[in-house]
Image (cartoon, grey):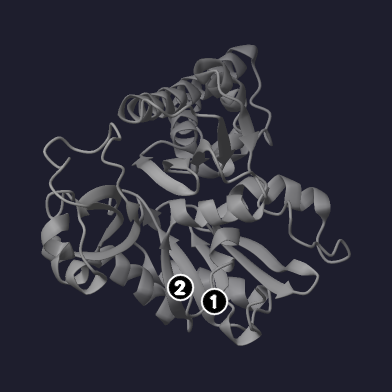
Amino acid sequence: MIIPKKNRLVGLDIGSHSIKLVEIDQTKKGRVLNNFGIIGLPPEAIIEGSIKETQIVSSALKNLFRNLKVKNKNVATSISGYSVIVKKISLKARNKSELEATIYEEAEQYIPFDVNEVRLDFDVLSPVDESAEDVQEGEKGDQDLIEVMLVAAKKDNVNDYVSVINSAGLTPVVLDVDVFALQNALEISNYEPQGCYTMVSVGAEELGINAIKNGVSLFTRDSSYGGSQITEAIMSELHVNFEEAEKIKLGGKNIGSEARKMRLQEIVSSAVSDWVNEIKRALDFVGTTYAEETMEKIYICGGASRTPGFKESLGKETNIPILDLDPFKNLVINESVFDAEYLRYMAPQAAVAVGLALRSIGDK
């Protein structure tokens, strides 16, 4: 289905160290990449998904839209981190109006925040197979059950993102969650959305894990791991400032002696080991909870997913095929406008923004 131009949204991934923007036109020829850009943020602007410097982020948004000559002011953005809870739960069957009236009461036992301090949304997935191993004891045989995907986000964080977007002269139409935006990007790339697989996103300050079966999340987790671990360790161990540490991390600065090079390798290896262990713990939990499922593949994305040794170590430790997610794979690209090599390099960082750009006004 072609989305009318008036209903299209700009995908805006407001990350801890940068903002990514994507515009996609949907035409008879397919989905066409119309715009893509990125602008950096200072490290103190957004911390653990919480906007700390509203003016800085707002100014960056204005600059990004101006530099890319984006006219559409309607945007889709997303949030993640500890302020967001995504959980699949089983509830007694009821109609939608009854569920809407009781969802806050039902959700209270599943979220670690005061229910009055969160915004809730939900989606009814399907009736529950009561023979399945993950149905809670005591629920079997009570009456028909339904599976519900519950999403809870702290109101303060939601309001902060809405406020900073409004202050940049933009209109927030859709507020999504990173893991669902990534699923959108994966599915339009024709990566076989059926079956059981895991998506892993490693950003600057956050490692996101989403285990999926047939397009539905089984389990999600956000952890405070990411590329900033490496940057901060380089600053401490090699006694350099943030900018120099970033250049060293990305291989753009010679650090001199063999001893310093060896120490850099140790820093990177330690961080990669932390990430892999966190992913393994999540996969072990999924394997225990859904013993009948076999994890077929792991798709990785996020700027830090390119860290040397990460992909190889994750494959070795999990014995699961590891694939890079390229969100541009099945988009129509005008190579007179976009440099193909640049898009390949930026693809890991663009996945959330691409997934958001697929949203539209009025969709569900």
Q: Is residue 2 left or right of residue 333?
A: left
The vertical placement of 360 against 111, above or below, is below
In x, y percent, where is residue 316?
56, 16
**Quadrant in the picture for residue 122:** bottom left
**What residue is shown at x 66% (from left), y 63% (from top)?**
37
Q: Is residue 249 above or below residue 291?
A: below
Q: Secondary structure at mark 2?
A: helix
| Visible residue check, residue 49 | yes
Q: Which residue is mark 2?
A: 58
For residue 166, what is the image quadrant? bottom left
Residue at x 60% of width, y 75% of height: 65
Work out whether residue 213 or residue 178 is closer to the camera in this orientation and state it.
213
Number of other residues with Cα within 10 Å of mark 2, as a class: few under 14, some 14 to 19, many 20 or more: many
User: Which residue is labeled 1 in the image?
Assistant: 62
Q: Are marks 1 and 2 in contact (CB under 8 Å)?
A: yes
Q: Residue at x 58, y 43 (%)?
A: 303
One can see residue 244 in this view: no
Left or right of 63, for residue 283: left
Residue situated in front as seen by the camera: 213 or 157: 213
Label 1, secondary structure: give it.
Answer: helix
x, y percentage for residue 349? Answer: 60, 50
Q: Is residue 8 above or below residue 45?
A: below
Give amino acid for label 2: Ser
Residue at the far bottom: name it: 6
Q: Nearer the viewer, residue 258 or 11?
A: 11
> Quadrant of the rendered structure where residue 7 is?
bottom right
